[in-house]
Image (spheres, rainbow, N blue to C red):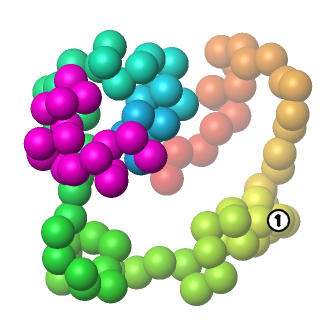
């Protein structure tokens, strides 16, 4: 697996990015991960400043953390931690 990725990506990317990524995400060494799985991860060779390969792109101006802070701080949003789920809760939920 490691040699396959070295041919595809080069040693400069394989070890520092993909080896650490597979270890963190799947608790597997790169040698244990099937090549077909890792090759599905997108690799970009152009040097455009865009994150996605689509015509219209948008990222939150102040980042995703601020976006979620604002959403979760809205008066219509109630956050309950350490709450058990039961089927009766669904009855009170309004689906948009």
Q: Is residue 1 visible?
A: yes
In the figure, 39 relative to 22: above or below? below
Q: Residue at x 77, y 66 (%)?
A: 69
Q: Residue at x 51, y 19 (%)?
A: 27
Which residue corresponds to mark 1?
73
Q: Is residue 56 visible?
A: no
Q: Which residues are magenta?
A: 1-16
Q: Position of residue 21 (x, y in %)?
A: 45, 37
In the figure, 55 relative to 35: above or below? below
Asked if the magenta segment contains residue 44, the reply would be no
Residue 9 placement, left or right of 17:
left
Check disc 1 and report its element: helix, strand or loop. Answer: loop
The secondary structure making up most of the magenta span is: helix
Q: Residue at x 86, y 37 (%)?
A: 80
Q: Position of residue 86 (x, y in %)?
A: 72, 14
In the figure, 68 relative to 25: above or below? below
Q: Total number of numbered labels?
A: 1
């Amino acid at each position: 697996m490691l040699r396959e990725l070295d041919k595809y990506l080069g040693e400069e990317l394989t070890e520092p990015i993909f080896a650490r990524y597979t270890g963190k995400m799947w608790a597997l060494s790169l040698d244990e991960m099937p090549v077909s799985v890792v090759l599905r991860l997108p690799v970009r060779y152009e040097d455009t400043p865009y994150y996605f390969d689509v015509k219209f792109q948008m990222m939150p101006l102040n980042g995703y953390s601020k976006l979620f802070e604002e959403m979760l701080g809205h008066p219509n949003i109630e956050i309950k931690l350490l709450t058990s789920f039961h089927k009766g809760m669904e009855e009170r939920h309004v689906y948009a």
